[in-house]
Amino acid sequence: MKVLVLNVGSSSVKFVLIETSVEAIDNENEQKLGRGLVDKIGIANATVKFTAPGKAPYVSTPPVWDHAAAIKQVITVITDPEHGVIKDPSEIDAVGHRIVHGGEYFAQSVVIDDNVAEKITECFELAPLHNPHNLKGYQLMKEFMPYVPHVAVFDTSFHQTMPRHAFLYALPYSTYQKYKVRRYGFHGTSHRYMVYSLEKHFAKKSRCDFKAITVHLGNGCSITAIDKGNSVDTSMGFTPLEGLIMGTRCGDIDPALVLYLMAQEEISLNEMNTMMNKYSGLAGLSGFSNDVRELSEEMMKGNERAELALRAFAYRVRKYIGSYMAALDGADYIAFTGGIGENSVLVREMVMENLDRLGIVFDRERNANVPSGGGEISAEGSPVRVFAIPTDEELVIARDTVRCIAASKNKPCP
């Protein structure tokens, strides 16, 4: 079956068309037919891109004033006679939607019905920058394709296995009872894919028989402690702001700093929120970029602020790895993924060097020569084996979509 995977944001729609089935999943015989992006929604010259194997890339700059127009562009490009991959939208058998926040309602992916849509709406307060747009994408695509099932796959659901002592904050318990203030965690589909990759391709051992630390490093960053395939702790919290230093997010800070800076700078709640989310992290420390490639180049040229940003970034990852080694009582595997985790030789080296006493023996040569499909970066015989592995969140969404439909329309997927 052909599954259209949608990731709808405030100003963009990312989409991938994947051909798969329950049997194809079992045999890893799935095919990505094409992927695209509608960017800069709301302006006259938005960007629409689409690439498919064996086809010339599609690029156009039409006016895309709203999300309805963006969804129309998705349908237009995948059915384009020259660049598209299907002749008619009726060839699409299902749509998988990335939904950022499922609160405590969803521990698994589900076929979307009115009740599910209502629960997603109730989570708007928990993810005001994401959930409304995610749901809007479903509603609009449902208008175009009312005849196919739509499945919600949540960033948060993987982390619903965390024990209470790990997800609760030391605030008055009433804040959890009344407002569901707790650690939720994000990047769940990526961390899930790491467990799958370790089990099937790298560790080649049942997930029930190992402990792992999965490290997703991109513009957004998170790290998760895995025991028997389950998330038992994760660095992102009530929002994606907590935890590691990120591209433009500050990560962990003293919460009293928020009150102090608001008073000193005489800024509003919204302005403080913008500072922490959009002007901090690598961009804030370096003063010029959140791109690790640029920072690495500048560091090699002697730029002290670039080096400071990267060292602080790597140091925070090292601290979390150490704390999760303690939380797990040791780990068998560490897996780096995400745009930075997969591709930055320098960052992996800065994180991994001199951790021998934790049982992590790093191999600089392996780290510098990781194959495109991923590979080991720890030394032969290292008690803890370390890998760099490409993630595939869209494939996870497509697989969940197929499994949920196979299970039934009204039950969560297995």
Image (spheres, rainbow, N blue to C red):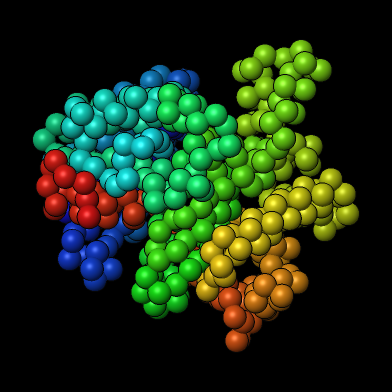
Quarter of the rendering containing residue 70: top left
Residue 303 in percent (x, y) is at 86, 49
Vertical side of 28 occupied by 294: above or below: above
- Say left or right for 67 vs 202: left
- Say left or right for 191 vs 310: left
Q: Camera-side residue: 17 or 172? A: 172
Residue 151 in percent (x, y) is at 24, 41
Q: Work out whether residue 207 can be spotted.
A: yes
**Image quarter hosting the N terminus:** bottom left
Vertical side of 246 occupied by 344: above or below: below
Name the outermost residue toward the bottom. Answer: 381
Residue 164 in percent (x, y) is at 45, 45
Vertical side of 221 occupied by 391: above or below: below
Vertical side of 204 occupied by 258: above or below: above
- Say left or right for 40 vs 90: right
Q: Residue at x 42, y 28 (%)?
A: 177
Q: Residue at x 57, y 48 (%)?
A: 235
Q: Residue at x 60, y 64 (%)?
A: 325
Q: Camera-side residue: 369 or 333? A: 333
Q: Camera-side residue: 103 or 394? A: 103
Q: Residue at x 50, y 31 (%)?
A: 173
Residue 75 in percent (x, y) is at 26, 35
- Say left or right for 268 vs 148: right
Quarter of the rendering containing residue 378: bottom right
